[in-house]
Image (tube, coloured by chain):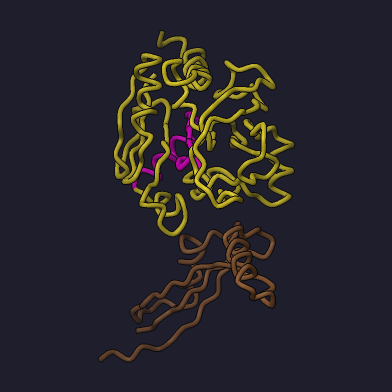
Amino acid sequence: MKKVKVYVTLRESVLDPQGSAVMGSLHKMGYDEVADVRIGKYLELVIEDSERDVDSLVNELCHRLLANTVIEDYRYEIEEVVSQ
Amino acid sequence: MKFAVIVFPGSNCDLDMYHAVKDELGEEAEYVWHDSKDLSSYDGILLPGGFSYGDYLRCGAIAQFSGVMDEVRKAAEAGKPVLGICNGFQILTEAGLLPGVLLRNKNLKFMCRTVGLKVENNSTLFTNEYEQGEEIQIPIAHGEGNYYCDDATYDHLKENNQIVFTYADDFNGSRNNIAGIINERGNVLGMMPHPERAVSELIGGKDGLALFRSIVKQWRESHVSHA
C-alpha cells in the first residue's frame, strides 16, 4: 500500500482573497515580514497496490476530481506504507 | 413543456424552481433525484441552487459525477435547454459544460440581496422576452460567485456573445462583472443570480419570470405541431 499526500493550491495567476485576509491579519498582529499567504488543500490518500501505475492513477484522480486545473495546481508525494 | 428539476443532496432552491415553471407559468414540472438514469421524457432541465454535497472539495465538484449528470450531458448534446442557477451554474462549470469557474467572493462574504443585472444578449432561448441592454432586478445569494476564466476564454466568450448577464455593479469580483454565460450552441445557460426568486410582485419583484417565459416560448415555437 502507498500513502499519497496531495497538495492542491490556487494558481499564481488567481487571486486568493482568503490568503490576503490572513496576511492582513498577520500584519495587524505585527508580523510585517510575512510577504505573502496562499491557502490550499491537503489530502491524504491510501492506495492499494495494483497493476496500475500510481503516478498515472494519482494524476488522473487530480485531473478528474481533486483539483480544478482551471484555477488550481497540484503536487503530491508518495510514501510506502508497511502493513501491520 | 415538461421540465425536470434535478434534486441533489443539499439542493435548496428546487422548490422555487418548480414553483416558477409549474405555478407561475402552468407548465409541467417534476422533481428528479440525482441518481436518475433517464431524462429523455423532459423538454428542459433545471439545475437548482443550494449546496450540493455540502460544497465539499469545491462547489459542484462532487455533483458533476452524480448519476444524473450523464443524462444532463445527453440533454445538452440533444440541444435541450439546460439552465443552472447558482450552485447549478457551479456544477455546469465543474462538469465542463460551461467554461471558467466560480471562486470565493472577493470580500469573502456570503452575499444575499437584490442586484441590478444587464441583459447583454437577448437573442438566446433564455432571454428572448427581455430587451437588449435592459436592466433587471434579481436576487443573488452566494459565497462563491466570483466568475473567473483566463484571457483566451474571456475573449472567446466575448466574440461569441456568450456573456448573457452582467452585474450593474461589481460586488463579488467577477471578471468583467459576468453574472451568466451560455455555451456556444446556445442551449446551456449558467447564472449566479436567482430569477426563480423573482417571479411575483408579492415576493418583491418578477423580473425573473421573463427568463422562464423565454424558454417556454422558444420551445412552443419549435414544437408547433404539439400545440
**What residue do we see at 65% from left, 34% from top?**
B163
In magenta segment, residue B203: no
Is residue B190 visible in the rendered image? The answer is no
Q: Quadrant of the C terminus of chain A?
A: bottom left
In magenta segment, residue B82: yes
Q: Quadrant of the N terminus of chain A?
A: bottom left
Tag count: 0
Shade representing chain B: yellow
Q: Horizontal placement of B118 versus B226: left or right?
A: right
| In this view, A34 is above or below A81 | above
> Measured from the top left, where is residue A39 in percent x and y?
56, 67
Is residue B157 visible in the rendered image? The answer is yes
**What residue do we see at 67% from left, 65% from top?**
A12
| In this view, B210 is above or below B183 | above
**What residue do we see at 39% from left, 40% from top?**
B71
> Please, which residue is most extreme toward the left here?
A84
Chain in brown on the image: A
> Measured from the top left, where is residue B41 in percent x and y?
34, 28
**What residue do we see at 58% from left, 30% from top?**
B115
Q: Horizontal placement of B220 versus A48: left or right?
A: right
| Quadrant assignment, res A70 | bottom right
Highlighted magenta segment, given as a residue range: B67-89
> Measured from the top left, where is residue B29 in percent x and y?
33, 24
| Quadrant assignment, res B10 | top left
